[in-house]
Amino acid sequence: MATTRSSARSKATTAPTAPAGRATRSTNVGGRAQSTTTKATAKKATNRKPLVSRANSMDTGVDSEAHPGSSQQSSTMNVSAIPCSSDMEREPIKAFLRIRPQLGDGPTSEPYLHTISDTAVRMSDPSSQLQSSSRLSSLNPSSIYTFSHIFPPDSQQSQFFNRTTLPLVQDLLEGQNGLLFAYGVTNSGKTYTVQGGSDRGSAGILPRTLDVIFNSIEGRHGDGQFRPVRLNGIEAADDEFEDVSPHNASGGRRPSLIDILDDALDIREDIDPTVLKLDRNYEYTIWLSYSEIYNEKVYDLFSSVDPSEHSPQSGSRPMSTFLNMPLPSSQSNPLLLSRKALALKSCPPSDSGLSADDVGLAGKYVTGLRQIRVHSAAQAKELLRLGQLHRRVFGTLANSQSSRSHAIVTIKVLRVHRGERNDPSSIQTSRLTMVDLAGSERTKYTQSSGDRLREAGNINKSLMVLGQCMETLRANQRAVARSLATHGGRIDTRDVKKGLAVVPFRHSKLTEVLMDYFIGDGRAVMILNVNPYDTGYDENSHVMKFAALAREVCTVAPTATSRPLPVLKDKPERPQSSREIAPHRRKVTISTRSTGHKASEAHLEVLEEDEEQDEDDEGEIDPVVEALFDEVEQLRAQLHEAEMRCALIEAETREEVMEEMEERMRSMEKMFERRLRREAENHEKKMDAKIDMMARSGLHRPAPPADVVYPSLQLSDDEAENFVDELAELASDGSSDSEEHASTASSTSPSPLARKSVKPLSKAQSQPSQGSNGNLRGASPSSSQENAVRSSDSAGHDGLVPMRKQLLNRQIASLQNRDFSAAPSPVFEADVKAGKMAARLAKSGDNKLPSLERNLMQLSLQEKPRESTIIVPDKVARQEAVANGGDDVEYVPLRGEVDPGKKKKRQLGKSRVINEEGMADIVLTSSQESTRQLRARH
Ligand SMILES: Nc1ncnc2c1ncn2[C@@H]1O[C@H](COP(=O)(O)OP(=O)(O)OP(=O)(O)O)[C@@H](O)[C@H]1O
């Protein structure tokens, strides 16, 4: 059974105790393990154990050497022997949120991110605000996310640096590793955070880190006898390393690429003055490497850099063999630039003080990645600037607004005690890696195609795998913690073995390169950049969720131990393997449009060669097994991608269906509203029609409008009762007359009850004016009504008299039903007055009946100010009425007569079915028509 790195580490920490103030460590020089004691001063340099997740293969975790008493069959492990004990300096990944200010480069809508406190923000979906009236809006309106600290839009670069990066710089100079990565969607401010802006004071965390390092080690530079190799190894620096082929191309007459690109990057003069307190007994050498991961391939951005400087005293600046090449004069002959992708290899376990069996647990390194020694912050910044230019030339020029690659800068520190500077085993290496991740984006929004689509796919893939790794690490750590809790401080290996999953670092180059930090070596800090004014709410919420996940993953600050000094150097470059794929060629045109400068252009052809497949890497594994393993991983990655795509499609489909449903519901709501309104209108119409009918038949008398003034009649109760009696008397006369006339005139048409509609009387009109006969006179329409009635009287007086008497009877009946004790209403008073007049006139004989009726009608019209219809009994009478009263004459049946409406309905029914609503419509239309005509006439 192989031992894990954790067990190897535990061996180192359980070695014989060193004297106070000195740390014990295990080193391996020339392949021989030996125990060495150093003057380790850093307090963090003692008793640290690696993270449990490095030892995902927990089955190999029992270290019989460290725990001689423990048996191979034992299902539990001593906590001190495994990398998850409570005494370890485990800490979760720190997550800082930086909110980008509004710069007027996007939509000016309200931000969807609101700071609640220094550590919490609320993120509200802007679309839910739009749908606030909708039923679905309350589903997930906002979420709260917490961070180690939140930097508002107005926070300064120096303030940001001091809080997020300075502790990592301190750790670096004390021998500990650290990782810092900026994560966020495109245009959220990652590059600004890492590199900085062009204004004074806007230098980012990377140049500030270099300033602080060189400020702090001032006067304590090492002599550079050794150089770093791979991740943690060191070897003797020799001439081969220093012998970078000199390049004189800049002396050419023709302009070079750098002349074109130079304007693009501003050289900042910002220098961070911070100085850290360090142990004065150590000497330091600083090494820089700069790589990018573009389209899932790792490239060295220093590959064509000539440091041109061998001593700290030299003032010469580093140069680029690419950028200083003279440009070809013709466009047809572009400048050919080629670069080769670098392969990743597993670090030898000896580099990290692990046993030879721990292959694959020491992390991976980029083969052939140049690590250049820098002597000053200015030189380091100049190198980085060249690296940035290379990055632009090779990776992102076609899309210069956005970084389409992950940029990785690693600062390595070799620290050696002054007294032991010639002893390679006493050298400590530590590194700080800063990653400016490419912005995640959804291809759907950018409408990418071809190369851009490939870029976006690879960016999203690597970020997705990063998320998966975090998730698996968290799950593994929880499984171990659960086991610890269940077994009282011991881990059940069988239990944990079942629960632990393989962390999919190998699914992307980014995670492969960074895996060493996640499985144990160093603190990790994540910077989340968010532009809350951006339209990409969905993408930003993914970023937030990623942060929430990452914050639950623990890393361990490693021991600041010296690294072993391997005797072997990197293997010489091997001839290209037959498996190599044809290099990828791209044509690129670079042009500057900077104001005040002449526009210039360069035509390049970029050739990207694939990395060599190193057959020796992890050579102990059977190639067939390795191939199968790769295939399994590939399939797993494909499966995951397919699942993600499905999930995305499902989410989009759900969204679309929900939108459609909402749309439907809204239209249904509108339809029902319309129906309801129509129903209400129909009911209103029906009610009006009914009231109208009742009014016409005298069963209903509507309340008068408030502004109608009726003649005042002051009657005492006695007078009123007498008056009713008089009317009753008259009615009894009338009824006998009526019966008489009914018998004699049964062959003639029934008596009509004629009324003429008038407009409501205004106050002035309604003021009673005494006419020649002493009756009240209304507005002019009443005189035409009078005429109409009079003419009908003269036309058929005999037929009309009984009907008039009927009218009188009805009015008397309604008066008799009145409660005289109640306050007299204006209508009642009008009736009383009319009745009085009727009684008076009745006494003078039947021949006075028409004028009595006129007066009654006059009053009745006053009390019924709204428009009504002349009612005529039959066709002949209607013709008469039309002749006198105009077109607005309608037939209204007396009780027992056939309803003309029904008649009409029957007629219409022959051709089509008309329901109640239809009838109401017909009634309404006809009443509107008659009103219109009446209005037109008056
Ligand atoms: N805190 C800030 N203060 C002022 N300007 C900022 C800030 N953050 C970002 N910017 C500006 O916003 C713009 C976009 O920022 P930047 O290029 O850093 O985004 P990015 O996330 O790196 O984008 P990409 O992933 O596409 O490369 C730049 O013009 C930058 O100067």
Image (cartoon, rainbow, N blue to C red):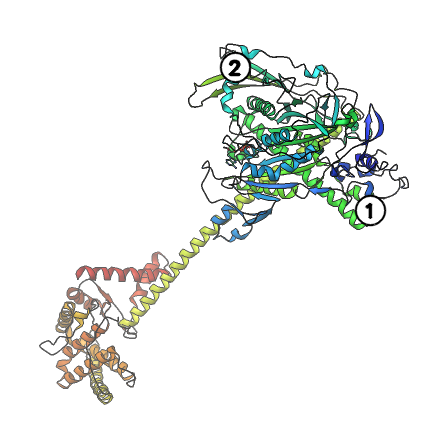
Q: Which mark is residue 256?
A: 2
Residue in the picture at 30% in, 65% down: 901
Callout 1 secondary element: loop
Crowd around label 2: few <14 · some 14–19 · many ≥20 (10 Å): many
Where is residue 301, by image quadrant?
top right
Observer-nearest residue: 673 or 887?
673
Q: Earlier in the sequence, mark 1 or mark 2?
A: 2
Observer-nearest residue: 321 or 553?
321
Instruction: Tell me if residue 635 can be seen.
Output: no
Amino acid residing under circle 1 = Arg
Quadrant in which the C terminus is drawn: bottom left
Left or right, residue 252 beside residue 902: right
Residue 237 point in image, percent of width and height: 73, 19
Instruction: Tell me if residue 76 can be seen.
Output: yes
Amino acid residing under circle 2 = Ser
Q: Looking at mark 1, is its residue's CB closer than 8 Å to ligand 1?
A: no
Question: Number of labelled discs?
Answer: 2
Q: Looking at mark 2, is its residue's CB closer than 8 Å to ligand 1?
A: no
Where is residue 14, by image quadrant?
top right
Residue 309 point in image, percent of width and height: 63, 17
Callout 2 secondary element: loop
Mark 1, residue position: 490
Observer-nearest residue: 525 or 308?
308
- Look at the picture and state if 310 lies above or below 865: above
* Mark closer to the observer (1, 2): 2
The residues tagged by marks 1 and 2 sit, at their Cα atoms, a distance apart of 65 Å
Left or right, residue 34 beside residue 812: right
Residue 665 point in image, percent of width and height: 48, 51
Residue 197 point in image, percent of width and height: 52, 31
Where is residue 858, by image quadrant?
bottom left
> What residue occupies the far left of the structure in this picture?
772
